[in-house]
Each structure stands twice: as structure tokens, then as C-alpha cells.
Amino acid sequence: MKNSSKNNFSEKKSNPNKKNSNSNFFSKNNNSSKKNNRTFSNSHKNKVSSKLSESDKSNFSSFKRTKLTFKPNFEISSKGTDIYQEFSNKKNFDDWIWGKHSVYEALTKGRAINRIWCTSEILSSEKFYILLKQIKSNGVLIEEVSWNRLSQLTCGASHQGVVLQLACSKTISLNNLIDFSKKNCSNPIILALDGITDPHNVGAIIRSAEAFDCKGIIIPQRRSAGLTGTVAKVAAGALEHLPVSRVVNLNRSLEELKKNGFITIGLSGDGQMSISNFNEKSPMVVIVGSEDKGISLLTQKKCDFLLKIPLKGKTSSLNASVAAAISLFQLTSK
């Protein structure tokens, strides 16, 4: 077929006036160029298309089958779903409770609670309002969120508008912590955390505080990690022997501690005095800030002393848990 096509084409070039002799050939040839096909009528095109060879038809049908079976987008989306499902399964919900009845029972039974998420309907309902108000005054963080946000937190579970995260240990009020610290010690040390959100740091600080006979920990309600399972695990059992008070406002708590005879000491790289030169003997509160931001400016104004740990190397700062351990060692060894 190809050879004959070439011969006829060359014949057409050499004899341009012989149109009748070539017309039969062009009407039967399927492989003519687009320029020649433009001169044909629609009826002639239909006639040509009806004379496709069997091999062309089979190739065309196989091409159609290939298109139908090609589904790369569906395969990718299914893999993404599997990855999301795998992530959801790995999330630990052992210390989480959701649903109206389950959460209500946990609240009335006095369970140790770290945090509560709820919708505005739950927050303003008669059944929950008084309980939530009392729990919030004890330092539990209660956050009003949307229904969709709760669905994200629980990975699509039937939460009924309220979700609760249990704490690994109960907290006590600030007044009870003050009384407990002064019970068997003339110069107790209490550690206060300002803006430490990493649970690993909080757990390590609790472990060091208990090891150096610190009498308690103060954790603010916001901008701080709660007493989660990670904190308890890193603390390695120290949380069972160290009372923790979770306060609504850290600065108001420092003022209350001052009224009860405590001096406030802030750890800061900008401190004017080295902690090794500090020799005060008094009940004290040691405030540890986050590694990146340190103690907030408002909290620094509440401090009686700003102490620094002298560093001899090129490193400009220490991890919060390391700084707390060094400071407690210095303050308790004198």
C-alpha cells in the first residue's frame, strides 16, 4: 500500500493534468493528507471512514479500553485516604472522653481534668453551666469551639458537642499549695512555669523539682502544657510525689505568694546577678520561662530578683528543663 501511494503521488507531480486517473485512487485511500480531504464532501468522508481496516478497528477499540481502565487519580486519592486513616488510628485517645452523658459523669465524679472543648450550646446549658464554671475556677482550661473543630479533634467521632481530656494527676488550689509548702519547711521553694508548652520540658522540670525537694509546681491555665500522659511519662513517677497547682492567672498568683512571705525569682539571660552569688534565705518562687521567649515582660516586673546562669561557651541559652535543674541545685545547696 505504501509503495503504491508513493508511485501515485509522484505520478501526480509529473502529470498535474491527469485528475481523472487519480480520483479513483484518492477515493479509496484511507491515508490521504488533510489538504486533499478538505476537497471531499461529507458523504465521501463517511464512505472513507466506513472502510476502516479490521486492524485499525481493533487498534481503535483497544485504545478505548485502555482509556477506560486508566485511573491514576483514583489510586492517588485512595492512598491519601489510607494515610489519613493511619494517622487517625495512631492518635492516642486513651485519656479522652466525649459525649454529653460520659463527660457529665466524669465532671460529677471529680475526675482529674486537663482540658475541655465544647460548643456554645453546651457552655450555656443548665446541666453543664455550674459544673464548668466551678471547674474553670480550679484551673481547668475550657475552650469554646465550633462543631467542626470538635469533629477534627476526635477524627469524626460522635462527640455531641463536648470533648474532655483527662489529666494524669489531680491539681490543688494555690492556697492549699502554700499551706502544704510551709507545713514542714521553713524556706520552701516552689517552681512556677511561664509559657512552657512542650510536655517533654514540663515532665523533665517536674522530675528535677521533685529530685531537689521542691515543694510544688505552679502551671498557668493558658500558654502551658497540661498534665498529660506525656508529662507523666517523662516525669518518671515524680508527679505522684509533687503537688501541682494550675492557676488562671500567673501574675495574680505571684502577688498572692508575695503576701504570704515568698520572694519571686525569675531566671533570665538578662539578669544582673549570677545565681551562684545569690544568698537570700526565704520562702521563694522560682519562675522558669520558655527557651525561645523567656519570662514575659509583665511577669518580670513581678520578680524581686532576676538571676542568670553564667555560661562560658558559645551557646547563648539553655533548655528550660536544664536551666531549672541547675537553678534548683544552686539554690538548695546553700
Image: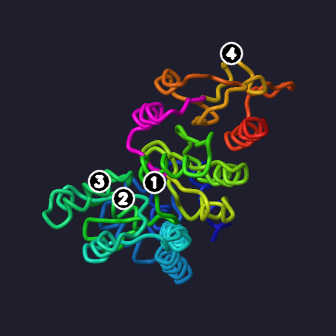
Mark 3 to mark 4: distance in Å? 44 Å
In the rendered image, residue 252 lying in the magenta stretch gets the answer: yes
Residue depicted at x 30% and y 67%: 43
Q: Amino acid at mark 3?
A: Val
Q: Nearer the viewer, mark 3 or mark 1?
A: 3
For the point 38% across and 43% down, the residue is 248
**Marks 1 and 2, how far apart in space?**
7 Å
Q: Secondary structure at mark 4?
A: loop
The residues colored magenta run: 245-265
Residue sitting nearer the eye, 140 or 85: 140
Q: Residues within 10 Å of mark 2 (few under 14, many from 20)?
A: few
* Numbered badge on residue 40: 2
Quarter location, residue 247: top left
Which residue is disc 3 drawn over?
Answer: 145
Residue annotated with mark 1:
36
Q: Nearer the viewer, residue 148 or 291?
A: 291
Instruction: Between label 3 and label 2, give the one nearer the viewer.
Output: 3
Q: Nearer the viewer, mark 2 or mark 4?
A: 4
